[in-house]
Amino acid sequence: MRAVYPGSFDPLTLGHLDLIERGAVLFEGLVVAVLQNPSKTPTFSLEQRLRQLRAATAHLDRVDVRSFDGLTVNVARESGAGVILRGLRAMSDFEFELQLAHTNKSLAPQLETMFLATAVHHSFLSSSVVKEVARFGGDVSRMVPKGVAEDLKTLFNRSSPSR
Ligand code: ADP
């Protein structure tokens, strides 16, 4: 069975990457689908987010990275996926994720949503937290892959304080 892991990945964090690595073990193929939402202005362009993901997943044969616009159920169908993979960090994710899962089930009853619990040491990580830390010059090296840390540094034009 193939799965699709949709998200904004703005930017990719080590929490996302942990989910991708575990998903690549569980499924025959995993398509990481990056949302190109024209109504929202992302911090990183679609091209940058695709590049970050491709660099960080180059060692994973079963992982493909692509962009999508519109409904997750459509990208799942186009990718030949039977499962939508999502991550759960805390109870605060649960309500929204459950609502999404029910919506997707009503749109495409043959598709299942499966959740992986985040690795506990990544449970506090989100793209927005990472951006806040980087904006104020904090060290994000344990939160994001190396390439993303460099992109954040360029974006905010600050150097991380030494630990
Ligand atoms: P979206 O805008 O679709 O929520 P995100 O890029 O924020 O996109 O998240 C994509 C998926 O990754 C969501 O299911 C989210 O719960 C999960 N996720 C985000 N951060 C982490 C993390 N630190 N550990 C595990 N899963 C995560």
Image: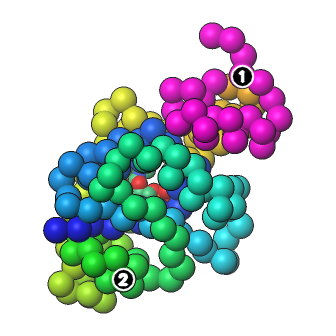
Tell me the magenta residue range. Answer: 139-163
The residue shown at (44%, 47%) is: 58
Pick the front one: 87 or 98:
87
Residue corresponding to mark 2: 78
Q: Look at the image and tell me whether residue 33 can be seen.
A: yes
> What crowding class fits label 1: few (fewer than 14 Cα within 10 Å), some (14-19), or many (20 or more)?
some
Q: Position of residue 154 (x, y in %)?
A: 78, 39
User: Tag 2's secondary structure?
Assistant: helix
Quadrant of the image for the C terminus?
A: top right
Q: Residue furthest right?
A: 157
Q: Residue furthest bottom?
A: 107
Question: In the rendered picture of this protein, how many numbered marks are placed on residues?
Answer: 2
Pick the front one: 95 or 9:
9
Q: Position of residue 120 (x, y in %)?
A: 31, 33
Residue 159 in magenta?
yes
The residue shown at (68%, 35%) is: 150
Q: Quadrant of ligand 1?
A: bottom left
Distance Cα–Cα, label 1 vs label 2? 41 Å
User: Tag 1's secondary structure?
Assistant: loop
**Nearest-to-viewer mark from 1 and 2:** 2
Left or right: residue 150 compared with residue 6: right
Identify the amino acid type marked 1: Ser
Pick the front one: 155 or 40:
155
Please tell me the numbered disc located at residue 69: none
Residue corresponding to mark 1: 160
Residue 58 in magenta?
no
Q: Residue furthest top?
A: 163
> What crowding class fits label 2: few (fewer than 14 Cα within 10 Å), some (14-19), or many (20 or more)?
few
Quadrant of the image for the N terminus?
A: bottom left
Q: Position of residue 65 (x, y in %)?
A: 45, 62
